[in-house]
Image: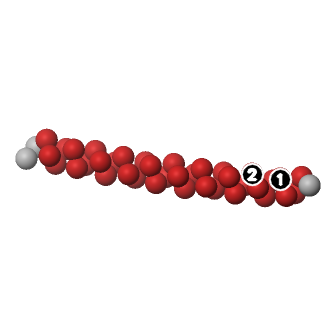
Amino acid sequence: MSVIFEHYFEEIHFINYTINLFLTVFFLQIDKIRVKLKYR
């Protein structure tokens, strides 16, 4: 039982990490676009 739980926890951790990474990249891109629009 605990082995299954640990595996499940790792899966959640991986998904969470991927989402955080995606959001970070996404917001960085938005910042770049904003800067471009500002200094046109």
Q: CA distance from mark 1 to mark 2?
A: 6 Å
Q: Amino acid at mark 1?
A: Phe
**Is 30 left or right of 21, judged from the image as shown?**
left
- Is 28 displayed left or right of 40 in the figure? right
Q: Position of residue 8 (x, y in %)?
A: 76, 55
Q: How is the image coloured?
A: secondary structure
User: Which residue shows up at 43% across the image and 48% down it?
Assistant: 24
- Residue positioned most to the left: 40
Asked if residue 29 lies left or right of residue 20, the reply is: left
Which residue corresponds to the image point at 89% horizontal and 52% vertical from the top-left? 2
Query: How many badges with numbers are in the image?
Result: 2
At x 36% / y 46%, what residue is drawn? Answer: 27
Q: Quadrant of the N terminus?
A: bottom right
Which mark, residue 14?
none
Circle 1: element type? helix
Residue appearing at x 51%, y 48% in the figure? 20
The picture places residue 12, in percent across and down from the top left corner, at: 68, 52
Task: Classify mark 2: helix, strand or loop.
Answer: helix
Say which amino acid is labelled 2: Phe
**Residue under circle 1?**
5
| Horizontal side of residue 17 vs 26, given as left or right | right
Q: Which percent across, then down, holds residue 9?
A: 75, 51
- Which residue does the numbered mark 2 point to in the structure image? 9
Position of residue 32 measured from the top left corner of the image (x, y, whole percent):
25, 49
Q: Are marks 1 and 2 in contact (CB under 8 Å)?
A: yes
Residue lying at the far right in this picture: please name it.
1
Pick out the residue farthest to the top.
Answer: 38
Characterize the local packing of mark 1: few (<14), some (14-19) or many (20 or more) Cα atoms within 10 angstroms. few
Are there few (<14), some (14-19), or many (20+) residues within 10 Å of tag 2? few
